Image (tube, rainbow, N blue to C red):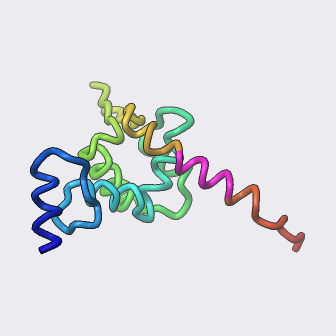
Amino acid sequence: MREGAQLKQAEAGHRYDVFHTDCPARDVVDHVTSRWGVWALIALRGSDLRFYELRDSIRGVSEKMLSQTLRALVQDGLVRREVEPTTPPQVTYGLTEFGQDVSEPLTDLFDRITERLPPRSAG
């Protein structure tokens, strides 16, 4: 009975309920909080980057995983993809207004974590 009430609420135009399995916002949350989604959003906070610049700034991500992550974030409206008609084409990624808004608390979270961690020991 509870699920039915949640679905009716979403259909009536109220706020999304990300705890409901059919909620479209749940996919966006999954993409943002995915292993590489967080890093892509944080990396793009400073400036627009070309694919290889973005890959190099996120150490450990494969080209395949970065491509999949960026595709999902573009589809969600968090990242914009601009293609310059050159040979070869130059593709630049940047945050949309929505992406800026979503990535701000992630940056705050990372700042808090790094400020509170004990200093690294030499060695």
Q: Residue at x 10, y 67 (%)?
A: 4
Residue at the far right in the pictured view? 122
Q: Position of residue 62 (x, y in %)?
A: 42, 62
Q: Residue at x 42, y 60 (%)?
A: 33
- Which of 112/87 is in front? 112
Magenta region, mostly helix, strand or loop? helix
Say left or right for 75 vs 119: left
- Quadrant containing the C terminus in the rendered view: bottom right
Q: Position of residue 17 (x, y in %)?
A: 26, 58
Say left or right for 119 vs 111: right
Q: Position of residue 90 (x, y in %)?
A: 36, 32
- Which of 19/91 is in front? 19
- Quadrant containing the N terminus in the rendered view: bottom left
- Which of 6/53 is in front? 6
Identify whether 19 is placed above or below 92: below
Q: Residue at x 58, y 47 (%)?
A: 107
Q: Residue at x 28, y 61 (%)?
A: 18
Say left or right for 57 vs 86: right
Residue 111: in magenta span:
yes
Q: Position of residue 99 (x, y in %)?
A: 40, 40
Identify whether 46 is placed above or below 111: above
Task: Give the tally of numbered discs.
Answer: 0
- Quadrant of res 97: top left
**Range of residues picked out in magenta:** 105-112
